[in-house]
Amino acid sequence: MRLVAENLSRSFGRRAFGPVSFSVEAGRVLGVAGENGSGKTTLLKTLAGLIRPSGGRARIFFEGEDAGDGCEPRDVPWRIGWAAPDLALYGELTAEENMIFFERVRGLVPTPGRARALLEGVGLPPDSHSKKPLSSLSTGQRQRVKLAFATLHEPDLLFLDEPGANLDEAGRSIVQKVVAEQRLRGITVIASNDPRDLALADERVTLS
């Protein structure tokens, strides 16, 4: 599998980012760096198919499939995982209820055991994910839930925007674990200004 950007750019009346070009292979991690306002989040959203580019293109090539010209990210949302500060989950539901709900949304057969295992895998104790509404959890705990949500369907491509935000050192070790596990599945793209997040990357794109 490969993620390829060719002269990719996005503008909103003014330039948000680009043009940028790069290629990332399966098992690799790409870091996206840049000052605040340089377009890091916009680039991730474009690569994930959440917004359309203004110029250039992003393509995904899956091994064992008819590669041709590849496919656009927006054509394969079920193969993409996303975690970002603006990701909105349901505050009135528990973390476990959120996971089970989104299993249904993604067409998966809901299994409480899988939801619990994922949440415990990101370091959430049972009472925090099965008894308390998400809105009552700390910002660090909610960030852990977002990481579990992003990997719920074992995506081929995982996009993490500021994954270490609001996490203590134990939480940051969870980010490292998530990224290590994703290397076995496919590609990770991390946008951050934090050197500890970017240290997980094999290669880097810097926006200005």
Image: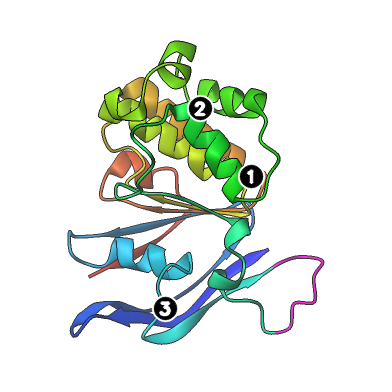
Q: Secondary structure at mark 2?
A: helix
Please state, as top left, top right, bottom left or bottom right, where the C terminus lies in the image. bottom left
Query: Is 170 colored magenta in this rendering?
Result: no
Q: Residue at x 57, y 76 (%)?
A: 72
Q: Amino acid at mark 3?
A: Arg
Q: Quadrant of residue 146?
A: top left
Q: Amino acid at mark 2?
A: Glu
Mark 1 neighbour density, 10 Å: few (under 14) some (14–19) many (20 or more): some
Q: Nearer the viewer, mark 2 or mark 3?
A: 2
Residue pointed to by mark 3 = 52
Q: Position of residue 104 (x, y in %)?
A: 61, 44
Q: Which mark is residue 154?
A: 1
Secondary element at image label 1:
loop
Callout 2 crowding tier (Cα within 10 Å): few <14, some 14–19, many ≥20: many
Crowdedness of circle 3 by 10 Å Cα count: few (<14), some, many (20+)? some
Dot 3 falls on a residue whose secondary structure is loop
The residue that disc 2 covers is: 96
Q: Was residue 65 drawn as part of the magenta stretch in this picture?
A: yes
Separation of disc 1 and disc 3 at Cα?
24 Å
Q: Residue at the front extreme?
A: 92
Residue 146 or residue 198, whichever sits in front? 146
Marks 2 and 1 close (CB-CB < 8 Å): no
How many numbered marks have been drawn onto this rendered protein structure?
A: 3
Q: Which residues are magenta?
A: 62-68
- The residue at the point 45 percent across, 38 percent down is 147
Instruction: Looking at the picture, tell me which residue is in the foreground, 125 or 160.
Output: 125
Residue 114 left/right relative to 206: right
